[in-house]
Amino acid sequence: MSAQEKQLRRIGPGFSIAAFARATGLPYRRVEKAVSAGEIATVTLGGVTKIPETELPRVLRAYGIETIAAE
């Protein structure tokens, strides 16, 4: 497993910044800046910062990204 795959792998609830960027289609740097600015809520436990799953639909609506319903 490459270092990038490890970074994207989800361990426990929530998303890493890289996984959240991939799930939303937003650039990594934009997600990182939004987290730093407090635009995206995070939870830090044991030194690991995660973006809660509940932020995904809120951020998609806020950035005007349409989600395609599964058929």
Image: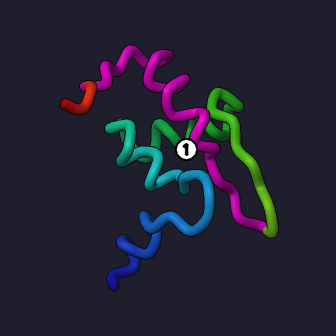
Instruction: Give the residue furthest to the right.
Output: 46
Q: State the residue position of label 1.
A: 32
Q: Is residue 70 left or right of residue 26?
A: left
Instruction: Give the residue furthest to the bottom.
Output: 1
Please give the name of the residue rendered at 38% of the width and 14% of the height, measured from the top-left corner: 64
**SS of the residue under disc 1:** helix
Where does the image place residue 63, in percent across and percent down from the top left?
Answer: 43, 19
Where does the image place residue 5, in percent across and percent down from the top left?
Answer: 36, 72
Instruction: Give the residue furthest to the left.
Output: 71
Q: Residue 19: say if magenta.
A: no
Instruction: Please name the amino acid that badge 1 sits on.
Output: Glu
On screen, residue 1 above or below 17: below
On screen, residue 2 above or below 27: below
Placement of the C terminus among the 4 image quadrants = top left
On screen, residue 27 above or below 64: below
Q: Which residues are magenta?
A: 47-68
Where does the image place residue 58, in percent across and percent down from the top left?
Answer: 55, 23
Please give the name of the residue rendered at 62% of the width and 56% of the height, measured from the top-left corner: 13
Q: Residue 58: say if magenta.
A: yes
Q: Is residue 70 left or right of residue 63?
A: left
